Image (tube, grey):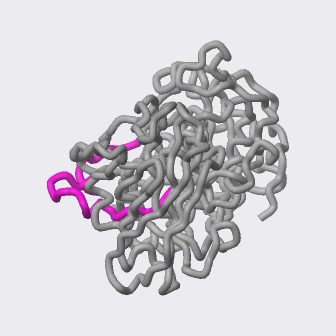
Amino acid sequence: MNRRHLLGAIATSVPLVSGCLTTVEAPPAEDVGSYSRLLDRDDFVDDPAQADRTVEQVPFVSLKPAPSPPQSLPEADRVLAAEGNTTTTSNTTNSSNTTGPAKTTTPEPVPPRESDDGSIDVTDEYWQDRTHVSRYSIDTVTVDVYPNEPALKSEMAKVWVGAFVYPRQKFVAEGTSERFVRSEGETTVSVDLNLDTAPRGERLHYVAIVLPGDAEIRSAPTKRTEFIMETDPFIIYPDDDEVRRAPNSGELEKTVEDRASRHSIEGAYLQTLAGRTAGTAWTVSFLAFKSAYDYAASRSRGRSRHEYVKYELLQGAADELANLLVSAADSHGITDPFQQVEFAIDFVQSLPYVADDVSKGYDDYTKFAMETLVELEGDCEDTAILLACILEADPYGYDVVLIQPPGHMAVGLWYEHDGAYKYRLDGRDYAYIETTGTGWGIGDIPDQYAGKPVNWYQV
């Protein structure tokens, strides 16, 4: 699909008024807080000269589907039943998404144990009975492999483990297990690594990937590999031969909202969103890997908003998220292409609206898609960027634009739809899509924005 550059405004530029959108304001350089150093606007695509070649060859994954609801949790603690707790949004002609799930609670995670021998045991309930890293130390990573997970076609397999500076930065070391036969049942394999040259005092993490027995990590097609999981960050202190858990600075806390929950486990956040599309209640549960979120959160903010979408399409998690949502829609019997678009819209609308000055402490702080998704909240430009990423990416592959009424941001979709409120942009009719609040259908527009001049941006 051809992606066009910024085309400009379709009407006289108007000053932004009070609302969810003001001006781009990145954190000042002296106020580092939980943010990394600020970079230039030109830091849009990583400089290949600054990235280790091995890092680029590793098939990292940002998101993975999870059971919905997670089957490993007690029945009373299943994440978000998709019924009850009705909410209604006004000014809408689409009433199919007016029901939210009932509030439930999630169990507290079981903290990993630091053993006397200098290793860390993974004890999260979620990972039990699934292929996962069960123990790791300075020189060995142990992986429990179950016969039907992952679903590789190869009967012979092996496990590759890489050590990286956290999050997903400089490559440090690697190792590969002996080959094993997957059909012989549950298998525990050990991967030896040498971290003698690993930096001391810096956060590191392990990444584990299952490969066919005849494949190599540097040459295997991504479709022949399966990203299992990564570990939480750990530290090796000077003159020490043990791995110790890194301080949990910046790790997001558990949250349970009406339509969304987040539950921290080893290496990932187990997340669930719930809603209703075309009369069908649904839940979508997935793993969002912590290093992918932290990497996104560390990037500079000095971009135009359409550049955030372009980054996600070229380097980010847009394709992964779009594929996850299409698969989730299929699993709920939502197979009509138009309803799958509505499903993606309802998914984004299920995220609570939170203004930047509340969530980040700045008047305007634009988020990358992984930040909005993992934090389970955002304001209008955050959710508009997230939806634009999803609908532009394969397998959706639609032409969308960002539409900016005074003090607001939404998405425009080039799509045949009678009765929709549309903008004529560059010779095409784009239907307005509101991304904040549930219940807004394609072409529904809040009264305060109808008929107002807008700026628009091709992504």
x and y, in percent, of residue 225 in the image: 57, 71
Q: Is residue 168 left or right of residue 111?
A: right
- The structure residue drawn at horizontal position 67% and vertical position 53%, both measured from the top left corner, is 55
| Image location of residue 18, percent across then percent down | 59, 20
Q: Position of residue 64 (x, y in %)?
A: 47, 61
Task: Give yes or no for residue 161 being in the magenta stretch.
Answer: no
Magenta region, main secondary structure = loop
In-front residue for pair 336/421: 336
Q: Is residue 82 left or right of residue 326?
A: left
Q: Is residue 209 left or right of residue 110?
A: right
Q: Point out the stretch of residues depicted in magenta.
A: 63-89
The answer to whether 222 is drawn above or below residue 285 in the figure is below
Rendering quarter of residue 224: bottom right
Q: Nearer the viewer, residue 395 or 31?
A: 31
Q: Is residue 165 visible?
A: yes
Q: Residue furthest front?
A: 239
